Amino acid sequence: MLKKCDFYNVTYYVPALILVIFFVSEFISKILKFNGGDFNRVSGLVKLVFEILILVYVFKRKKKNWRILISVCLTFFVVYFLGHFFLFPRFSLNEFIVNIYSLNGYLFVFILFYALKPQNLDDQKVLYFQLRLVDKILKLIFITNSIAILFGCVFSIDIFQTYPGTNGRFGYNGMFLHASHSSYVYCIYILYFYNEYLKNKIKENSLFLIVSIIMSFIVATKTIFLFNFLFLSHILYKRFSLKIFLTIFSFVSGIIFISRVFIVEIFKSKFDILYQIYKEEGLITMIFSTRNQSIPNDLIPYIREKWTWVNFLFGGSNFHIARTEIEIIDLFWFFGLLGGAIYIYLIHGILIRTFTENIELRIPMLFLGLCAVFAGSFFTNAPVIPYFVVLVFQLKFTFNR
C-alpha cells in the first residue's frame, strides 16, 4: 500500500505526464505546421527532453533495469556502427551522425519500457497506481480528441483533418499531427477498451469500445480499415459458430457486391486521390499509397551503390534522404538481416510475449503487429510508443493479479 506522502512523488505521475504532454505538443505541432510555421517539431523536442529525464530516472531508481537497457542499447549501437562503417565506397561520418536520430527512435520503446518495468514488489505497487491514473488520462485524451474529430467532420474544420489541406481524401484525426500517429493510437485504443470490456463487462467499457471503433472509421486511414476488418472478423468468429460466421460474412459480401457501383462512387468522391492512384498505378500501389515504389526507386539503388555483404547483416541507410515507410523493409534497411532479427526477437520477447499472456488478446495484438509491418513508422513513432507500452503493461497487470 502506498503511503499518503508517496502521492507527492512526481515520478509516480510520469506516464500520465508523458501522455498529456506528448498529446498537447502534437496539437501545437499540427497548428504550427498548418499555419506554415518555420519550426513545427515541438513534439520531437518534447520527446528528447522526456527521454533524458527518463534515462536519469532509470539510472537512479532502477539499476537492474539500467544494466539491461544499456546492454540492449549497446547491442544496437554496435549493429548500427558496423552497418555504417562498411558502407561502400567510404565511411560517411555525416550519415552516421545524422542517422543517430533514427537509431534513437528505434530505441525509445525500450527506454520507456524499462522505465516502467517493476523490479520488486514496491515497484509493482507504484505501477498499479500509475496505471490507474493513466486509465483516466487515456480516457480524457480519447474523449477530447473524439470531440475534435466530430467537430471537424460535422463542420469541415481543416486543421482536424487526417490529411490537412487535402480535398481529395476524407478523414478526420482531431488533434494528432500525422495520419500514422492517429492510426496506431486508435488501434491501440480499440485493444485497450476491448481488454477493459473483457475484464469487466459493464456498459461504460462496451460504450468506449464501440465509440473507439466508430471514431477510427472517421479517421479513415487504410491501416485502421485493415485493423478493423481483422478485429471485427475475429470478434464475430469468436462470438458465433463457424457456420453462423460464414453466413454473416457471405451476407455482408453479397451486399457489398450488389452495392459495388454505389460504393465505388462514394470511394471516388471521398477518396479521389486514392482512386486516381488506383487508375494510374494499380491496386498494390494504391494500398501502399505509393510507398512500395520506394523499393525499386530508393532501396534497391542504395543497396547496389553502397552496400557490401556485411551490410546485409548489419544494414546501413540514410532515412533523412529516403525510406520506404514499410516497417519490415525499413527495419531490414536500417539494421540488416541479423540486426533486424535481434530487434524483432527483443520486441516479441520483452514486450509482446511477456505482456500478453492472456489468450484473448494474442490474436488482436497480432493484428496490430501485422498493420505495423505493412503500414510503417511504428517503432520510430515516438508519440505512439507511450500508448503502446502502457497497453502492454495494462494487459500484464489485468490478467496476472
Image (tube, helix red, strand yellow):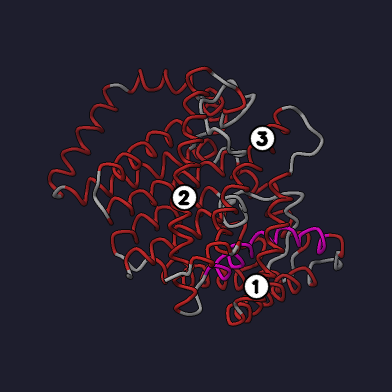
Q: Amino acid at mark 1?
A: Leu
Q: Secondary structure at mark 3?
A: helix
Most foreground residue, 218 or 8? 8
Q: Please state which of residues 206 and 358 is positioned toward the viewer in this rendering.
A: 206
Amino acid on which disc 3 is placed = Lys
Magenta segment, which residues? 95-116
- Foreground label between 3 and 1: 3
Q: CA distance from mark 3 to mark 2?
A: 24 Å
The relative height of residue 176 versus residue 122 in the rendered view (above or below) is above
Q: Which mark is residue 30?
A: 3
Q: Is residue 174 above or below residue 226?
A: above
Q: Is 358 within the magenta? A: no
Give the main secondary structure, helix, strand or loop, of the magenta stretch: helix
Amino acid type, residue under disc 2 in the picture: Cys
Circles 3 and 2: CB atoms closer than 8 Å: no
- List x then y, in percent, for residue 284: 50, 40
| Tally of numbered tags | 3
Q: CA distance from mark 2 to mark 1?
A: 25 Å
Q: Residue at x 48, y 58 (%)?
A: 390
Q: Nearer the viewer, mark 2 or mark 1?
A: 2
Residue on which the image places disc 1: 313
